[in-house]
Image (cartoon, grey):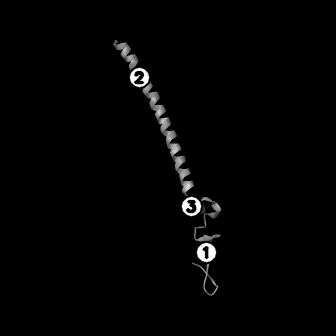
C-alpha cells in the first residue's frame, strides 16, 4: 500500500468511527429513557395502594375517609387514637 491508499483508508475508518459514535450515543439515550420508564413502572407497582389513587392519597393506613380512625372506649364513646 502506498501513502495515498493509507490516507484514503484512514479517512474511511475515521468516518466509520464518527458514525458508530453517533449510533452509540443514540443507544445510550434510548437506554436512559427505558431505564427511567422502568423505574417509574417499578415505583408504581411497589407503591402502597393508598398512595396510588389520588382520592386516597390524603389517607394513610391509619386513616379512613380522610379522618383518623376512631375506636370505641369501654364506655361506648368514640375516641381518636
Residue 22's spot in the image, x, y percent?
47, 32
Q: Earlier in the sequence, mark 3 or mark 1?
A: 3
Pointer 3 local density, CA inside 10 Å: few below 14, some 14–19, many at least 20: few
- Label drawn at residue 23: none
Residue drawn at 50 percent across, 41 percent down: 31
Q: Is residue 81 above or below residue 2?
A: below
Tag 3 residue: 48
Number of residue marks: 3
Residue found at x 64% / y 84%: 77
Are the residues at dot 2 and dot 3 in contact (C-beta closer than 8 Å)?
no
Q: Nearer the viewer, mark 2 or mark 3?
A: 3
Query: Which one is in front, 6 or 60?
Result: 60
Residue with the most extreme bottom position: 75
Foreground pick, 42 / 14: 42
Q: Mark 1 packing: few (<14 Cα in 10 Å), some, or many (20+)?
A: some
| Label 3 to label 1: alpha-carbon separation | 19 Å
Could you tell which of marks 1 and 2 lies nearer the N-terminus? 2
Q: Could you say which quadrant of the image residue 6 lies in?
A: top left
Per the model, the C-alpha gap separating discs 1 and 2 is 72 Å
Q: Is residue 21 above or below residue 10?
A: below
Q: Is residue 79 above or below residue 44?
A: below
Q: Nearer the viewer, mark 1 or mark 2?
A: 1
Callout 1 secondary element: loop
Tell me if label 1 and label 2 are in contact, CB under 8 Å. Answer: no
> Which residue, given by chain and number where applicable, does mark 1 sit on?
69
Residue at 56%, 54% (x, y): give it: 45
Q: Is residue 40 above or below residue 72?
A: above
The secondary element bearing badge 3 is classed as loop
Disc 2 secondary structure class: helix
Looking at the picture, how far across and down is residue 61, in whole percent?
58, 68
> Which of the numbered marks, if any, corresponds to residue 13?
2
Amino acid at each position: 500500500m502506498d501513502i495515498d491508499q493509507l490516507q484514503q483508508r484512514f479517512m474511511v475508518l475515521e468516518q466509520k468511527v464518527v458514525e458508530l459514535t453517533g449510533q452509540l450515543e443514540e443507544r445510550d439515550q434510548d437506554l436512559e429513557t427505558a431505564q427511567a420508564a422502568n423505574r417509574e413502572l417499578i415505583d408504581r407497582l411497589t407503591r402502597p395502594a393508598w398512595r396510588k389513587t389520588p382520592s386516597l392519597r390524603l389517607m394513610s393506613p391509619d386513616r379512613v375517609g380522610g379522618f383518623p380512625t376512631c375506636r370505641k372506649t369501654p364506655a361506648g364513646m368514640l375516641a381518636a387514637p
